[in-house]
Amino acid sequence: MFLTKNALPIVFVFFSITNLYAQPTSWNSATPYNIGDLVVSGESTYIAISENSNEEPPNATYWTDLSVAASALGVPEETVPTLDTTTILDSLSALESPDGNPTSVSSSKIINISTNGYSEAGAQKMSAGFIISGTENLKVYIKAEKSQESGITPLTNPKLQVWNISRTSMLYENDNWGTNSNVSDINALGGSYPPIESTDAAVLVTLAPGAYLVDVFGAAGNTGKALVAVNNVDSTSSSQLINISTNGYAYTGAQKMSAGFIISGTEDVKVYIKAEKSQEAGITPLTNPKLQIWNISRTSMLYENDNWGTNSNVSEINALGGSYPPIEATDAAVLVTLSPGAYLADVFGASGNVGKALVAINKVN
């Protein structure tokens, strides 16, 4: 499950909501606002990142300045109104960490974020977002693999597509990884990098700094559980992968969503992990997700949360600001300090319910 060999410091905010961009209106204390609504307050334009009423911008729990989204997208502010809400909200994943610096003080790093989750058809497919920060191009290895877990319905013959963040251009596509012109380079990565089955999908590509999306779905319209992973395999570039978070379906028992991550180095790391009801349109969301953090062997459950507001350190989660705190009171999150090692984060419905959720793991110190 862990397929990277270079460090991936993680900072994330990831939303995926489908609404067409509308012209902003003046903020009104009597108006209820939905996620994606645009308002003008003072001399700035804001986008709602959480449903609210009588919460005046720039309250960071509910609003984000559009200039921030423009900066994250790397486009002029006047270009932002031409983009749909999905693009604008996805761009928020480029926000800096709470200390204002994408590279944290600790020398330890989070590496290899990979997720096992269900991919359905159409809007209900699995989608992973990531950003390359820096000034140099970066060689990235991305794969979508039929899940090898027992007791599940695997996604046979997964297909993988890599898009720019606005979904205006599909950059790469693969069905069976052996069809790649650089398949010898993939094989040369060695170890567990090459996919297990010939019908799995993978690409080894060089990307410029920016934000990207990876879609995973059945090549024949089929559904099932798959692993998606994005890995920095570039030993020379100074650029880094940041923000890998996944929207996918979580079922019950062995069919839950599970994200694996490794902390490398010698120092403990403060990590923020959240499981959020998906805010996408046209899907069945996982209401009231529950989150459990395990050691890699699943012999010890280290942390568990159902509703994030019940955490004893909820004030610290709120203090992260921006879009770090979950959207809904019934979402789950933990802010914990972990030693170097390998971990699993399981996401499932607290009431045995199923649906689509976002899971993300972030280094915040």
Image: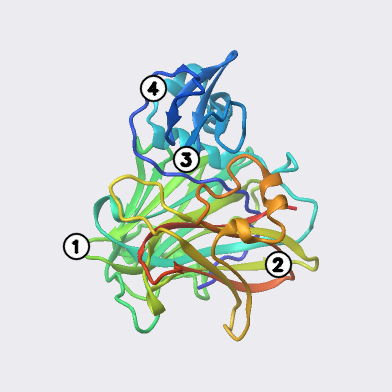
Quarter-wise, where is residue 120 in the image?
bottom left
* Identity of the residue drawn at 49% across and 20% down: 28
Q: Nearer the viewer, residue 313 or 45?
A: 313
User: Residue 334 at x, y = what percent?
Assistant: 63, 61
* Mark whose residue sits in front, 4 or 1: 4
Dot 4 crowding, Cα within 10 Å, few <14, some 14–19, many 20+: few
User: Residue 232 at x, y = what percent?
Assistant: 57, 57
Q: What mark, if any, has residue 264 been given in the picture?
A: 2
* Mark whose residue sits in front, 4 or 2: 4
Q: Secondary structure at mark 3?
A: helix
- The tag earlier along the polypeptide, 1 or 3, is 3
* Identity of the residue drawn at 64% across and 48% down: 237
- The tag earlier along the polypeptide, 3 or 4, is 4
Amino acid type, mark 3: Asp
Q: Which residue corresponds to mark 1?
A: 220
Amino acid type, mark 2: Ser
Q: Which residue corresponds to mark 3?
A: 90
- 243 left or right, relative to 178: right
